Image (cartoon, grey):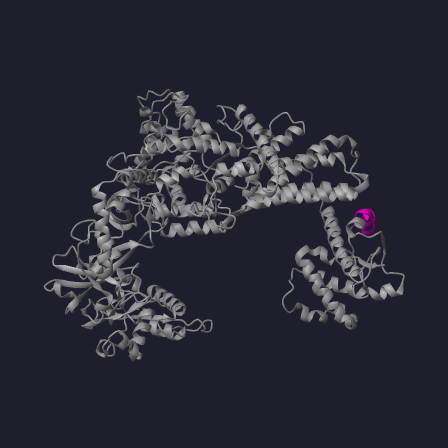
Amino acid sequence: RAMATTEGAKSFARRDKLIEIQKQAQKRWEEEKAFEMDAPAPESAAPEKHFVTFPYPYMNGLLHLGHTFSLSKTEFSMGYERLKGKKTLWPFGFHCTGMPIQAAADNLRRDIIGMYQEIYGGEEEKEADAEASKEEEEAETDPTKFKGKKSKAAAKKGKGNQWQVLESMDIPREMIPRFVDPVYWLQYFPPIAKQDLIEMGVKVDWRRSFITTNVNPYYDSFIQWQFHKLRKLEKVSFGKRYSIFSPIDNQICADHDRATGEGVGPQEYVLIKMEILTLPPALQQLEGKKVVLLAATLRPETMYGQTNCWVLPHEKDGSEVWYGCYETKTPGEIAIVGERAARNMAFQGLTPEFGKVKEVLKVRGRDLVGLPLRAPLTKLCPIYTLPMLTISMKKGTGVVTSVPSDAPDDYQALMDLKNKPALREKYGVKDEWVLPFEIIPIIEIPYRRDDAPEGAEPELTEVAAKVACEEYKVASQNDKEKLVLAKAKTYKLGFYEGKMVIGEFKGLAVQEAKNKVKAQMLEENNAYAYAEPEKEVMSRSGNECVVALTDQWYIKYGEEEWRSQVQQHLQQDLNCYSEDTKSKFEAALSWLGEWGCSRSFGLGTLLPWDRQFVIESLSDSTIYMAYYTFCHLLHQGPFDGSVPGPAGIPAQELTEEVWDYILLDGPQPKDSKVPLEVLDRMKREFNYWYPVDLRVSGKDLIQNHLTFFLYNHAAIFPKKHWPRSIRTNGHVLLNNEKMSKSTGNFKTLKQAIGEYSADGMRFALALAGDGNEDANFEHDVANAAILKLTNELQFVEKSLTELDKMRTGPLELFIDRNFDNEINRLVKSADECYRRMQFRESVIEGWDKLQNSRDKYRAMAGPIGMHADLIRKFIECQTLVISPICPHYSEYVWGLLGHKQSVMDARWPEVGEVEPLLVRMNSYFDKTLSDIRAKTDKARAKKPVSKATIYVADEFLDWQQAALNVLRSVVDKGETFGKDFKKNMMSFPELAPFKAQTKVLMPFAAFSIDEFEARGPEAFELKVPYDEVRLLTDSIEYLKGELTVQEIEVTKWPPSDPAVLKNLSNNPATPGKPAVSFS
């Protein structure tokens, strides 16, 4: 593995120097207990505090750069707020609740059994494999005999990779079998995570750490109290609900229990029963049964308009498509659907036995074409099954009902069959199955064409799909992009503005009729309610999840009054740091509803009133930040609460009344064995530190955890304890690619620290990105950080030994005053960036630009040398400004500066006011140098250049002054330069005398307006408020070096030589913009 790569040992020496500094700093911080913070004592002053939290990471492995990127935002904020004088606290817990650890332990058990059977397997395994091979051979000729993709032996072996995952973490092979016990994961990984974070240099109070689950009796008691509160507040209820479900685990699979598909929820449909009136030969063995095709629809109100039904005759590559014929819960009924749909139906009570599918027969898709059907609500009978090639067997049932009046896909597919005899012939479609069927109008829609004039009245239509296909010029069912547009428009207009024109609910708005039609069909047994995952979801146990309808306890998120509380907090009080984050919260609040909070098994806290259930992992992690404020008093040492803390309270003494007293200012608990002074100390800690000032997290948690966080605080705590700010970020890429263990593009926190040093890694993390878009941690940037930090160390060490040789005295020279001003300006700019949590910009302002300014100052000082006071100020300011990002480097330099106290006790640098005039002079100098450099290079390309003559103008030409006065008068009146201004500018009376100069005046005015947009009103000044000649003359030696010329003369405009004047007539000098000639 390349480490801080440039060739040779020298590069490692630079990194190793930083690691040595890092170890020294961390040793000091540990000895001084720098990050241990307690609430002020009673009656003492309470300084402003900054309490930050980060979602406790899940302990099924090592911390990696993905964790590190998000938590670095918390860490940088801690460093900054500490410099600003606040009392800062960052506690850190470890999450162990839920299925991931349990699933990993179970997978490992299967791996070990599988490995044992591979070595010692007997006849049973051989027979199982032989049987599986036979099944697969038979499936090749007769797919109806295919049972599954795994042999019985392979099924016993499980996923077969958990052992390798643990080995990849450098866990000794002899230890791996211990991980079959889920509790062992809780003991093994948290201490490693703590040590890795310490080596990163995080400012965590480790006394306040813990693991979750009932292994920790104190945390267990706290979560039980939380759920008792939610139940008393009627925020928890019980009943059957659709949930994503893992069949192999036989329980609900929440976001944190998933390998893929986080955030995916159930999509509810109505399954329309379409009875086959005459069975084809392929279904003859079902004679005597009621055989139905089940078509999944999101729009039951459109069933009045059915003209046919669609099935998939074959896959796109021509291979066969197989449907299954399954027994349903209705006696004597057989339903034809795809295998995936049948699997979901089994877990929703739609099959005879929960969780089990009884397949009677398999049938090819092509054999279902041309079936006569009786469909509910439509006036047509029979209608026929027809072929459609765009059906996905991974969505819905594989059977699609057709409503061509309001579904563009259906309309165009039906038109294709009507208008293309060859297409009918290809699939054996008889004319009588298609040609007699006309569109049935069902919904009246006010249709607005995209190109309609603004304010034009919409056209009323009862065949919106036809109108949309015509508008978007859809030629066939293969025009997918056009059909997407047509579908989006018709569905939106139909749902929000449509009115029924047929059936029992004629005259009702579609939104109102939809549920009434659904209820009617369900009541008449013409349909089933059904749901499936919106997208594929894989559990951590390795199986594809379904939607199950199960009894469960659920939290009533989305309840109107509760949601309005959270929305009001979001709009009025919560700082989200970006509009994007705020809009994502608004979106989550708009759709988030009831959430199943109970599981049948797994790690966690038992539901206190129904102990057959475990509280799931996203529900026991919503208010634990309050537990941080006093948990160091409850337990100490191991994270599992096995060693009581300074308070000496047994966990069983933490009754509901005790928790109420501490957290809700409840009455003093009666008959409590806990001394009142102990309870008061815990209450004091809570009331000082709460609420959470900053919560940092990945943006993906907005859709669940972070919104739950807001909901639960709103329910349980008074408003003064609701969160103050939430800062989110995107995922982090590693070298512009997604991090992945399987591809090897992966790095743990420990590896990154070893490779780049803590500060090198932190520097690169700060530069990786700050928004909600994905950031990028780059190897080259981290390597460059090592070089930058060690180079600066060399400058600091050398400069501090040479301070007594540098200039002293008042800061009178422009270069001194300018550098001093730049330090002030950039320190203030970095301060503002840190305040907004824009850490990348903080580094750019407080490190890159500050050093660039130092480098320029050093070059301009030249032979007279730098000023000692300014160099010391620069080093001190830069050290403090970068300390939130690179604290180890700053600790070392702070010591070199002679400070006895730690940089952790230092404060943000106090600098003088920024002088705007010096900023202008600096900007003028840089811009002038850049302009003259470009002209020098251009002149040198034609002939050698040894001398540059710079001409400075005291005032503008008369026509230029007139133009500037006109422009300034426009601004003074509060008017703007509209699009027609330049066209009409010469109509101003003040410019009448200068009609002859129009060709040069107009470009000058346009340039001046552009300058105004960039610089403001100063662009219209007739004179600059500083001496250009002196400014340039004082810097001639620096200019000569920058331009590589032997001589520079600075003089007043115009040139005395007529030839030079003529040559510069197109680019004359003006105030603030010198001209230059070369010889």
Locate residue 1047, reporting x and y percent.
85, 52
| Quarter location, residue 1005 | bottom right
Q: Nearer the viewer, residue 962 or 290?
A: 290
Locate residue 921, reporting x and y percent.
75, 49
Q: Nearer the viewer, residue 1033 or 377?
A: 1033
| Quarter location, residue 95 | top left
- 1006 to 709, vertically: above or below: below
Residue shown at 37% from the left, 30% from the top: 187
What type of secondary structure mainly makes up the magenta span? helix
Residue shown at 57% from the left, 46% from the top: 780
- 244 to 1004, vertically: above or below: above
Residue stretch rendered in magenta on the structure: 1026-1038
Q: Residue furthest left?
A: 288
Instruction: Tell me: 128 left or right of 331.
Output: right
Q: Nearer the viewer, residue 481 or 975?
A: 481
Q: Nearer the viewer, residue 71 or 793?
A: 793
Locate residue 277, reporting x and y percent.
15, 69
